[in-house]
Amino acid sequence: MSDQEVTYSTLRFLQSPSESQNRLRPDGTQRPDKTEQKVFQYIQENHQQEETLRNLSQKYDATQNDNYLKKQLLTKKTSECDRLNETFQQMKGSDLVFTEKKGCYHENESSESLPNTGKLKELSWWCCGVKCYYFTAEANNWMGCNQTCQSHNSSLLKINDAEELSLLQPKTSQNSYWIGLSFRKMENRWKWIDNGIPSRLNLTIMHHRFGKSECAFLTSTRIETIDCYRTYNCICEKRIDCFSKH
């Protein structure tokens, strides 16, 4: 064998980064790559978002239900308030007039000029409780009586109940007086001139229907109806708090 020197070399193979990362761990498991990590992270974030949305949806449903209950309660309370207010107005409009009246008396009011004199004529109002009544000496048709009452800052009489009726009938003497009740042909029903609190007076004429306009008048014994163009005296009314003293 020659004395020529022999040189030995070791071959090494370069690995790509991906191959290096995929090498087996000492425990024999394969190291996950970045793509798998990103997918796993995305799944976790998506799950958290779904949980958040689910919680928000539950809170929204609870809020909606709470708002609905509050709305129902408000509607109920409003209805109760309206009923109480209606009851109070009925008491104020009729019951208090007679159950708390302090007696009846006359109240004079200078209202209109006497013919050819220029002097003011005093109107004598008869008052009971908080309501005053004026019985005209002049006769007129129903429409004319309505205008007369309006000119005195009042309205044709509306009788609230049987007690008020019995209070007024003795004051009519032998005359007949128009009151604020008429049959409206266009509406096919009887109607008091005041569209506010319904009268509690039970009248059989309220069930009668006519093909023409009819109006009601008061006597010392009854309430009757007749053609509105007939001429009778008038009964006007107004409250004490609307009364102008001179």
Image (cartoon, rainbow, N blue to C red):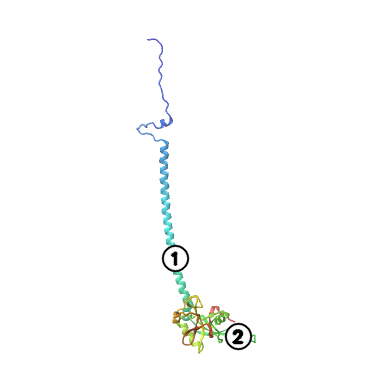
- For the C terminus, the quadrant is bottom right
What residue is disc 1 on?
75
Outermost residue, front side? 211
- Tag 2, which secondary structure? strand
Q: Amino acid at mark 2?
A: Lys
Outermost residue, left side? 28
Q: Residue at x 43, y 47 (%)?
A: 49
Residue 183: mark: none
Q: Amino acid at mark 1?
A: Thr
Residue 121: mark: 2
- Tag 1, which secondary structure? helix
Q: Relative to residue 64, is residue 111 drawn left or right? A: right
Dot 2 or dot 1: first in sequence order is 1
User: Where does the image place residue 159, in percent across and percent down from the top left?
Assistant: 48, 81
Picture quadrant where residue 201 is located: bottom left
Mark 1: few/some/many CA within 10 Å (<14, 14-19, 20+): few
Q: Is residue 115 above or below residue 70?
A: below
Q: Residue at x 41, y 38 (%)?
A: 37
- For the N terminus, the quadrant is top left
Mark 2: few/some/many CA within 10 Å (<14, 14-19, 20+): some
User: Where does the image place residue 233, in percent across and percent down from the top left?
Assistant: 54, 85
Picture quadrant where residue 67 is located: bottom left
Q: Residue at x 43, y 60 (%)?
A: 68
User: Where does the image place residue 235, in percent across and percent down from the top left?
Assistant: 53, 83
Q: Is residue 125 above or below residue 45?
A: below
Mark 2 to mark 1 CA distance (whole Å): 54 Å
- Identify which residue, 155 or 96, lies in the foreground: 155
User: Where does the image place residue 86, in percent across and percent down from the top left?
Assistant: 46, 73
